[in-house]
Image (cartoon, helix red, strand yellow):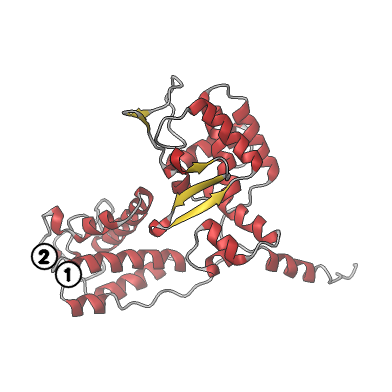
Amino acid sequence: MAGSGTGGALTGIDWSERTVVVSPGADPYRAYLDSLGSAESRRTMRGCLDRIAQMLSGDPDTSGEGQPWHLLRYEHTSRLRAAMIDAGWSGAYVNKHLAALRRVLKEAWRLDLMAAEDYQRACDLQPVKAQRLPVGQQVDAEALGAALYACDADPGPAGARDAAVLATLYSTGCRRSEIASMRVSDYDAAERSIRIVGKGNKERAVYVTEAAQARIERWMAVRGDAPGALFCPINKAGKLRRTGNRLSGMTGQAIADLLTKRLVEAGQRRHTPHDFRRTFIGELLDAGVDLAITQSLVGHASPATTARYDRRPARRSREAVDRLQLPEA
């Protein structure tokens, strides 16, 4: 948050006179990120905190590491919240950044860098109330079929792997980080189930369709029974990447990249892994599956989050409008 010595861009604090946190062991930024359970969460929250540090300093190249978060008070955090809103950020986007801010301030308090009263006041920020329609697109059967055909046309091991990944995405609605973190020991062929450790370190079981299992089994014949990741990176020579005797894991970004690659090869519009998740939820609710069961399958903490993907109210509204007759000219 160091600026030119004239003070923070938003806070008005003279950061040139601050006491900089030098020790990584006493850095609330590092302590907070280290407490998160997945690399995907750490990447997301690191981005939030870095953007906040950039807003506070006016320096687009700064990061939140080693910065004096403990100096922030309520007048600074409330001004920061207003600046996010004024920048046109969505309510959900603002609230995600405020959640990261509260957590890093909590770590500052835990590290005895901040008094309890200062911490509580700085965190006393109302969430931004906003309701938005879910963004993204539905994945239609034609696009998925074309992408799978592109995978089948690839005779190498990546073709079998990518087809299995696409089938698993479509039939489980898993997050890309959850697909990347699957281990072969989590896969139960007899039950057609995969054990997932999702957000908040919560375990759940997801189930694949028979067609999806056939794709997974085809990949397993290539993969073999080595321990490690269910889906692993493959180098340009077609070799499965290993760490010792275990197959290495993929990243969430690698899952997104292979999805884009196969859709482009098939001449289809691009989709994100979350589009598959959105489609999975919508298809289940359209089929009359109970909201609570759908919530459990996708690992949402609240049924309200799952309900946002329910397409039936929009369909009923459209059908109601279709009853109107526009007079002919």
SS at mark 2 in the image: loop
Q: Residue at x 70, y 41 (%)?
A: 142
312 up-or-down from 36: above or below: below
Looking at this rendering, what residue extends furthest in the top direction?
237
Q: Give the amino acid at mark 2.
A: Arg
Q: Give the amino acid at mark 1.
A: Leu
Query: Callout 1: few (<14), some (14-19), or many (20+) C-alpha neighbours within 10 Å?
Result: some
Marks 1 and 2: CB-CB under 8 Å?
yes
* Residue 71, numbered label: 1
Query: Callout 2: few (<14), some (14-19), or many (20+) C-alpha neighbours within 10 Å?
Result: few
The percent coordinates of residue 310 (x first, y second) are: 63, 64
Q: What residue would you read off at disc 2?
A: 18
On-image quarter of the C terminus: bottom right
Asked if residue 236 shows in the view, the reply is yes
238 up-or-down from 128: above or below: above
**Quadrant assignment, res 270:** top right
